[in-house]
Image (tube, grey):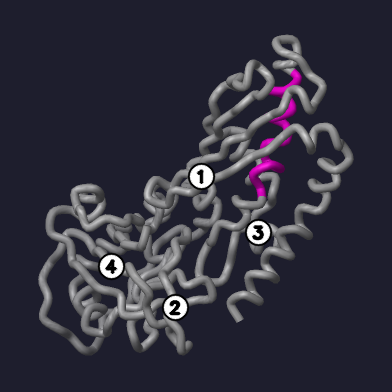
Amino acid sequence: MRSQVKKISLYMIKKCCYVFFFLILSNGVFAQSVTSSSTVDWTKNSFTSTVNFDMEAANLSFPTGKTVAVNKMNMYLPLMIKDPLLALKVDSSNMMGDLVIRDEVPFDNISSLIKNAKRTPGVFSRNGMELTMDHDLDMLTLSSLLVRHTYPYSAYPPIEQTATREYTGIIIDARGALPVQGEFVKDETEPCFFPKVWDEQMNLIYEKNMVQPTVAQNQGIIHYDYSSDESRYKDRVGNDPLRIRARKVYGVYRTDPVISRMDALRILSLPEHMELLSQGKVVILLVK
């Protein structure tokens, strides 16, 4: 089921971008001249790409051809990095490409973010025959396009209560292979822009619309990390966080931690903890 959904989503991405592929294919020289690679660092909300332009393959020479090469790299940059960018997971059942094909996020908006992101000037290597440019997109500028609520809401206080105390933040350890909710398999938790947190009774404990919109836009609704060294994210969860171990993982893309009902009550039983959720003071630990 999961693999089928992935194939469908990738098909939609390719269909959505058909016109851009056509533009590249119509310029065979350029298509053979440019290569790109991208990496994602969810701990820093960074989408980094390196674009290389082969001057020799494009029949350009240094230094006269540098301006032409730089202009073409800037012009076609959104096309070169679109595939990995549109494959970023938004939530448990959507990638960015799914939202683009449904016109929930126009590709023009994404293209504008790419063009306005930080980049290095073109640097020549290989005896002046290859021009390299590094590009760094802050993924919060991308996820902020999807924060559309005006006011956050809070979960209803539970009828059942448990002993708890006030904490400064919440850490959910979702590292390692976990049972998948509703399936007879195990899998690792994957990062996304807007994960949800559920309890074992599948009550929703935390999601995007519980967070103050300015917080969700400026810092995201969670912080991902891979380390048990809490000094790395102390500014997010404070000196005395509530530490929780995820029991399961949920979703088509395995993005949502499932915690025990008891741990959920430890969060829900205090109004101060509702404020923690509203301020996005949540860290999810994943396998690196």
Range of magenta residues: 68-82
**Residue type highlighted by circle 4:** Asp
Mark number displayed over residue 2: none
Q: x, y percentage for residue 98?
A: 65, 63
Distance, label 3 to label 2, CA atoms, is 21 Å
Distance, label 4 to label 1, CA atoms, is 24 Å
- Mark 3 vs mark 2: which is more N-terminal? 3
Secondary structure under the numbered disc 1 in the rendered image:
strand
Secondary structure under the numbered disc 4 in the rendered image:
strand
Please report contact status of discs 2 and 4: CB closer than 8 Å, yes or no: no
Q: Which of the two discs, 3 and 1, sits closer to the camera?
A: 1
Q: Is residue 54 above or below residue 4?
A: above
Secondary structure under the numbered disc 2 in the rendered image:
strand
Q: Residues within 10 Å of mark 2 (few under 14, many from 20)?
A: many
- Mark 2 vs mark 4: which is more N-terminal? 4
Residue picked out by circle 4? 173
Mark number displayed over residue 250: 2
Please report contact status of discs 3 and 1: CB closer than 8 Å, yes or no: no
Secondary structure under the numbered disc 3 in the rendered image:
helix
